[in-house]
């Protein structure tokens, strides 16, 4: 891992996808933040969970001791090989 990546990840609050909503809430409170990056078991970014998402899930009847962060994460990254590629087409030169 490069030192730039280590430095960038050092200040980012993260939580594992298998952690519970209760653990996520406690971690946000402990760190004084409203959002956490969610990481898969292999370390890849899975998405983001916010305090609002935790509250909404519990209000909808989710058990904070059993519902996992991975169950309510806001954005799931597709595997790199299936991501669409951006292709730019430049207009022909005007003469």
Image: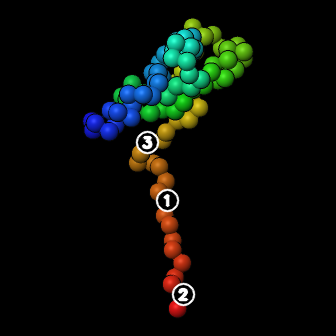
If the image is split into quadrants, where does the N terminus sit? top left
Identity of the residue drawn at 52% across and 91% down: 95
x and y, in percent, of residue 71 in the image: 56, 23
Q: CA distance from mark 2 to mark 3?
A: 40 Å
Q: Is residue 86 left or right of residue 63?
A: left
Counting every numbered tag in the picture gives 3
x and y, in percent, of residue 21 in the image: 57, 15
Q: Residues within 10 Å of mark 2 (few under 14, many from 20)?
A: few
Q: Secondary structure at mark 1?
A: loop
Q: Residues within 10 Å of mark 1 (few under 14, many from 20)?
A: few
Between 35 and 80, the residue placed more toward the observer is 35
Mark 3, residue position = 79
Give the color scheme: rainbow, by chain, secondary structure or one colour.
rainbow
Identity of the residue drawn at 67% across and 17% down: 55
Q: Of label 3 and label 1, which has the lower sequence position?
A: 3
Mark 1, residue position = 86
Residue 94, label in figure: 2
Mark toward the viewer: 3 or 1? 1
x and y, in percent, of residue 40 in the image: 43, 27
Is residue 20 visible to us here? Answer: no
Identity of the residue drawn at 27% across and 38% down: 2
Q: Secondary structure at mark 3?
A: loop
Q: Is residue 51 left or right of residue 68?
A: right
Mark toward the viewer: 2 or 3? 2
Q: Secondary structure at mark 2?
A: loop
Identity of the residue drawn at 35% across and 33% down: 7
Residue ranking furthest to the right: 59
Name above or below for residue 61 compared with residue 13.
above
């Amino acid at each position: 891992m490069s030192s730039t990546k280590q430095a960038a990840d050092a200040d980012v609050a993260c939580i594992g996808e298998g952690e519970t909503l209760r653990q996520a809430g406690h971690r946000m409170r402990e760190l004084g933040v409203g959002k956490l990056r969610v990481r898969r078991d292999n370390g890849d970014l899975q998405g983001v969970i916010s305090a609002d998402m935790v509250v909404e899930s519990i209000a909808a009847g989710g058990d904070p001791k059993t519902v996992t962060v991975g169950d309510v994460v806001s954005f799931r990254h597709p595997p790199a090989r299936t991501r669409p590629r951006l292709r730019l087409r430049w207009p022909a030169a005007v003469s």
